[in-house]
Every structure is written in C-alpha cells, then in structure tokens.
Image (tube, rainbow, N blue to C red):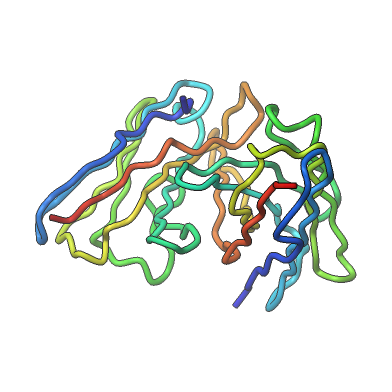
Amino acid sequence: QSVLTQPPSVSAAPGQKVTISCSGSSSNIGNIYVSWYQQLPGTAPKLLIYENNKRPSGIPDRFSGSKSGTSATLGITGLQTGDEADYYCGTWDTSLSAWLFGGGTKLTVL
Amino acid sequence: QVQLQESGPGLVKPSETLSLTCTVSGGSISSYYWNWIRQPPGKGLEWIGYIYYSGSTNYNPSLKSRVTISVDTSKNQFSLRLSSVTAADTAFYYCARGIYGNRGPYYYYYMDVWGKGTTVTVSS
C-alpha cells in the first residue's frame, strides 16, 4: 500500500470534469510541493503538473492542480477520450528520504 | 530538447545483476538529478533512486542494499545496477531527469523529462 493514497479509478463522461485526490502526511505533501504525471496506455509517464499547480509548456489549461494541508488534487475539465490514462501524484518524503509515487488512478472517459 | 534513452539487456537470470544505461542527448547531464523508476507489469510506478551529476546518490530504502547508480559525465550517461535479481524485479525501467529547488520554506522536486523505457525480464 502506497504512502500517498489515490483512488484506484475514476470515471466521467466526455466534456465533464473529474478530480483525483492524493492524500499524504506532514512528512511529504504537507511540506513539499506535489507533481502529477499522466501515463497514456503503452507509453512512458509524462509530467502534467509541478510545484502543486504549475503546468509545463504544452499542457492545456484543462489540467489543474491544487494542494491543501496534506492532500493534493488534480482536476481535469472538458474531458476527452484521449485523457484516458493512469494518473500518478508524486512528492518527496522527508522522513523516508525518498521519492514517493501514489498508487495511481485509472481515468475512464465513458 | 533533452531526450533520454535507456539501454541494456532485456533478459537477466535470477541471482544475477541487472545493468542499464541511460543516455542523455540534447543537453548536459550537469546540474540535474538523474533518476531510475520501474513499473512491474500491470502495477504502479516505483522510484529506485537518483544520482546528482556530481555523484551523490539517494536510493529507495526498500532497494538500497541491492542498488548502485553511477554517472559518467564525459559520456552524458548514468547507469543502474541491481544485484541479486528475482522475478519480482521484472518490470519496465525508466530513466528521468529530476529538478530540485526551494521556494521559501518549501522544497520542490519533480521529474520533467522521461525516457521511453525498457523492459527487463528476470527468468532462467
């Protein structure tokens, strides 16, 4: 079981909005910035959000990130079938002195 | 644009050592952290460790006793060695560039460029 907890799966219809949560603790999310990664089927992960809410060049503003306390949230609006992927949160843990990934959330666009 | 490419044997025998290399092209290996991450079939991502271009390392505590990551700045490459492998080490292995810094009291670390990955099977 991952130290960073994500729901195994979420689903929504095209055009709708979905949120994916990532729950941690004071030794990770509570004091370190969070990043999010998108892994499309059969491909390598790609950076989606960094420093809680910043988007790398080329990532559409349909994707957003936020953090409150020891939890972070990825939001995706205007869902498209091409958004079907696994999404992972990640951050450093100061107690473990190690990088952590969440368990991953599979997004299905119905 | 920086690109990463993993290379190495796709098949390793149990109890032997897995060796992979990541070649960095389109940019310098200097001033960044260089990571190895793996993903067993059908499972999530697991961070293996990183090396700073100067040579300092940090490993996942669960793998620390078996992992060595090294860097060759002259070749713009960094490498992974994982000893005493078992079937549980069968996975897709990725290399990725890490960026570290701080804003005020908070630190950030994220992986902004990833290789396409390479599959490693542990089997006799």
Q: Left or right: where does residue A46 sit relative to residue A53?
A: right
Residue at 30% x, 36% y is: A21
Q: Left or right: where does residue B50 sit relative to residue B106?
A: right
Residue situated furthest front in the rendering? B124
Q: How many dots with numbers? A: 0
Q: The C terminus of chain A appears in which quarter of the rendering? A: bottom left
Q: Is residue A108 above or below residue B47?
A: below
Q: Is residue A66 above or below residue A60?
A: above
Residue at 86% x, 65% y is: B73
Q: Left or right: where does residue B73 sit relative to residue A93?
A: right
Q: Position of residue B31 (x, y in %)?
A: 74, 59
Q: Left or right: where does residue A53 sit relative to residue A93?
A: left
Q: Position of residue B117 (x, y in %)?
A: 60, 62
Q: Position of residue B10 (x, y in %)?
A: 70, 60
Q: Nearer the viewer, residue A90 or A84?
A: A84
Q: Nearer the viewer, residue A73 or B87?
A: B87
Quadrant housing residue B119: bottom right
